[in-house]
Structures are given as C-alpha cells and as structure tokens.
Image (cartoon, helix red, strand yellow):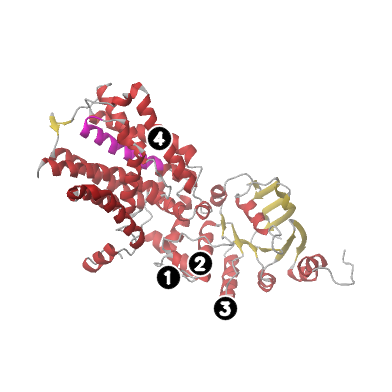
Amino acid sequence: MNNTLLQIKGLSKHFDGLKAVDNVDFELFSEEILGILGPNGAGKTVCFNLICGIYKPTNGEVSLDGQRIDGLLPHEIASLGVGRTFQIVKPFSSLTVLENVLVARGITRYNSFLKMWSTWKSSAEKKAALQILEHVGLADLADRKAGLLPLGNLRRLEIARALVVGSKLILLDESFSGLRPEEIAKLETLIQNIRRDGITVLLIEHNMRVTMGICDRIVVLDHGRKIAEGKPEAIQQDDNVIEAYLGRRRGVDVA
Amino acid sequence: MNAYVITIATIIVINAITVVGLNVIVGYAGQISLGHAAFVGIGAYSAALLSTKAGLSFWTALPAVIAISGFIGLLLGLPSLRVKDDFLAITTIGINFIVEAIFLYIPFFGGALGIGGIPRIMLFGIKIKGLAFFLLCLIFLSLTLFICRWFTRSWAGLASFAIREEESASSSMGISPMRFKLLAFVLGTAIAGLGGALYAHYMRFISASDFSFPVSISLLSMLVLGGMGNLWAPLIGALILGSLPEIFRPLVNYRILFYTFLLLLMIRFQPGGLLGEESFARRVLSSVLPGVKK
C-alpha cells in the first residue's frame, strides 16, 4: 500500500444542533481514487468544505502529508497543492476559458509581493494553459467567454482549474451530475488519466455506476456518520449501505 | 481655447483621474464603493494642509498625500471589505458621511469655512495655471491610466478579476480575497488622493461639501456610463457627464430631467456602459477599426 496523503481523524462539524459531519475517520493513500458516497444531506459536501478550509471543524483533525491543515484558510490549503471543483459550478463568467485556467496558474504568484506584479499575458503562460485545456478537451473553446459554456464544458473547465492547482490532491464534487452518458464516459477516462499522472483523487458522487467503476475504495456517509468503507464490491453488498439508500428490507431485521 | 472651456476641461480630467481610482475598486475588483468622494477629500485636505500649514510645495507634498490617502484607504478598507455587496455599499456611504463630518466639525480642518489660500502649483519657478494646469492634469491622467493598464496585465489584476467574478472559486485557486481586495482599495484610494490634490490646488479653496455623498454618486455614474472595468471608461464617463450640463446650459431648468432620462436609457439599452461588452459604441468602433474587440 502507498503512503497516506490525507488523513481525517474524528472530523466533526456541528451547526448548532445539526451534526452535519460527526466523528468521521478515513485516510486517502497517494495515487488512489477514493469515492465518498451517501444519500442527500449525508454530509459529503460539508466534509469537502472541511478539507478545503471553507468551514472550520468543530472537532477533529485533517492532515495532508502529515501536516495539520484544519484551521488554514481556503487559499492557504489550495497553495499546498489541493485543487477542487464545486458541485454548483463557479466559473469566472466574464473571463474567457483560457483566462479561467490562467487564474489557477497564478497560484505560485499570488503569495509573493514581487511576482504578483509580473504579467500574465505572456505567450509561455498562454501555451501552458492551452495544454491543460487540451488535456480536458476544451482547447477549441479557449477564447469563448466562460459564462456562455454549457454545463458539461463548465465541469471540464472546473477540472482543468483544479488540475492546475492540485499538484497533490484534487477533490471533485459531483463532477458527473447533470451530464449526458457520452460526457460521463469521457470524464471517466479523464479522471483515470489524472491518476495515472500521479495525482490523488477524492470524489463525491451520486451516480452509483460511475463510483463503482472508477473508485479504488469507497467511504459511505449517512446522517454525517461513516457507515461503511471498503472496495466497491464490498460496499455493494453492505447491509448498512443498502439500508441507507433503499430503507430496511421488509421482514428482515438488518440491525 | 477660452478660459471657460479650459476650466471645464480641467475639471473633467481631474474627475477622470478620481474615477480611474474608482474603476480599480469597483470595475476591476468588483467591490462597490459609494464613498469614493471621501478619499478624494482626504487627498485634497492633505494637500491643502501640507501646503498651507506645513508650507510644503505641491511636489514635495504629493508623495505624502498619495501615501496618506492610500493608508487611510487601507485602515478603512480593513473593516469594510469584510462585508459584501449591499452591505459594503452602505458601509462606504457611512465612510463618506463620517469623513465629511470630520472635515466639517473639526476646527483643524477649517470647519465650515473650509481651507482657502491654497498656493498654485509651481514648476521651474513658473506658476501653473490655465492651459498649463490642464496639460499637467492630462499628464497625471495618462500616468494613472498607464498604472491601471499595468495592473490589469499583472497577476494581481487577474486575481482581482477572479474575486469580482466568483470569490469562493478564486480562494480555491490560492487567491486571498482579503489581500487583493485591500490591494485594489489602496490603489484606488491612492489615485483618488492624487485627484483630490490636483483639485485642491486648482480650486485653491476647498470645503467639506465638495466631497459629499452626491459627489460619490456622480463619480460612480461616470464609471457606470463609461463601462465598469474598461480602461477608458473613466475618461468617457467624465467627459460626457462633465460636458453635457454645459452644452445644455440653455435648458437649465430641465437639466436634471434630461440627465435622469439619459441614465434610464443607459440602464435599459446599454447596461454594460458605453464601452461595455458588445455595446453599440464598441460595435461601431470594431467595424471601423479592426483592432477593437466587439
């Protein structure tokens, strides 16, 4: 087994009485694709936001490469090489597709008061950004305004930006939702290629078929708690998971 | 050119300079400010006090004036930029009223009498006035436009665009929203300070009401009319809103009506401003000059 990249220990986030995430533990090994599954309101996105620093945990620890990152701000965590996409796409609408990727490429400049004054309008930068766009299949739309793109392309754009930022880890929040089957197939190949390039992927997904197909391991959340963890085949057979998704089998006492 | 035209033109250019500063804050970084006149006032009062009380020349005082305006921008930006949108609009209105009240009620700032006797700007032993002052203002305007162009081409500028478009996405790309909002605010207020200093030395008498809330509104109108986020918008906006009242002077009783009507037409037909994306002016320009993007 590879070494641990991301470790989550006793992670909790309580909104007053609501335990959105409650005492969740799991770890993510390098170059692994780990899926977080769960019904609506299970705490998947909250879990993501805790890792990215949008929320501060009520309790527990998040460590990246052995270094505590909980309590850091979102831009600080991004600077450590954690890229993410958003469930509700957040493009920089009036910038072009290329400029959207260039914003992400600036990650090495934004923390230096000297470098931030150099220009982003160089041909070298443009070339590098175009390369990323080719990788996700958006190169021919590079000069289009991002706000004019359909959802499928916006999801690719989000992945392109996350790829630039996430040198270590990328978090994909329901990147498949709202896509047509042929778009899903393309995206699956893309994610497998990302892993082949040595980047670890943590993804949230509703689409069972996709999750089962591409994840090495799966963590299942329900009502903020981890109810199962393991290989996709094992998860499919897990009684707790079946109960969470489909309810209790009639006449059979699962608990 | 007669003195009347030069006076109007000079005021237009000074307004354009301050609106360039507002464009950095509102147009580039997307942080609404309805209190920009306060920072013009801070620049003007600093320049006036440094020249009348400390006896400094315009040129020796100028770096200090710009630094003071930017520093007060930083101090006021720190708490205000923690809130967004409507709340930020209200906070900046508040800043405008507080700053105006300080000028008006604290005797050090001249109180209701304002500050008079501000000396003319001297250059090589010559008093700068009339056309020369207008040209000096034009030079300063070019300088601020140059700085703005540099800003929009820098990573810092790109970071502010990202914050304007989508703040949480920008922070997931390593951009600290607070840092770059403050940066834009300081740059914008420092440019406002420069405009204020020129205003003080041009009018040679300033009072608190020169920097009141309606002035902020008119500065913002200029920016919106020109097209927020466009480099040339401040110049176009200041030119139109500065010259129209003069052109329509015979219709003095209907000026406000006309002005309101014009703004309504803009909002209805050209919401992006005259130089905004796909505006009428842009389409005409792009068909004439191939270099201009639609």
Q: Which of marks 1 and 4 is in front?
A: 4
Residue at the farthest bottom position: A182
User: Which kind of residue does numbered mark 3 sit on?
Assistant: Glu
Q: What numbered label is drawn on residue A182? A: 3
Q: Which chain carries label 3?
A: A
Q: In this view, does B246 lie to the left or right of A197?
A: left
Q: Nearer the viewer, mark 4 or mark 3?
A: 4
User: Which kind of residue does numbered mark 1 sit on?
Assistant: Leu
Q: Is residue B256 left or right of residue B165?
A: left
| SS at badge 1 | helix
Q: In this view, does A208 lie to the left or right of A73?
A: right
Q: Which of A75 and A180 is in front in this view?
A: A180
x and y percent of residue B292 in the render? 27, 63
User: Which kind of residue does numbered mark 2 sit on?
Assistant: Leu
Crowding at label 4, few (<14), some or many (≥20) Cα neighbours within 10 Å?
some
Which mark is first along the chain, 2 or 1?
1
What quarter of the picture does the N terminus of chain B occupy?
top left
Which residue is drawn at the image coordinates 22% and 65% (left, top)?
B289
x and y percent of residue B273 in the render? 33, 57
Which mark is first along the chain, 3 or 2?
2
Which mark is first along the chain, 3 or 1?
1
> Mark 4 highlights which residue?
B97
For the residues marked 4 and 3, what is the alpha-carbon distance in whole angstroms?
59 Å
Residue at the farthest front position: B253
What quarter of the picture does the C terminus of chain B occupy?
bottom left
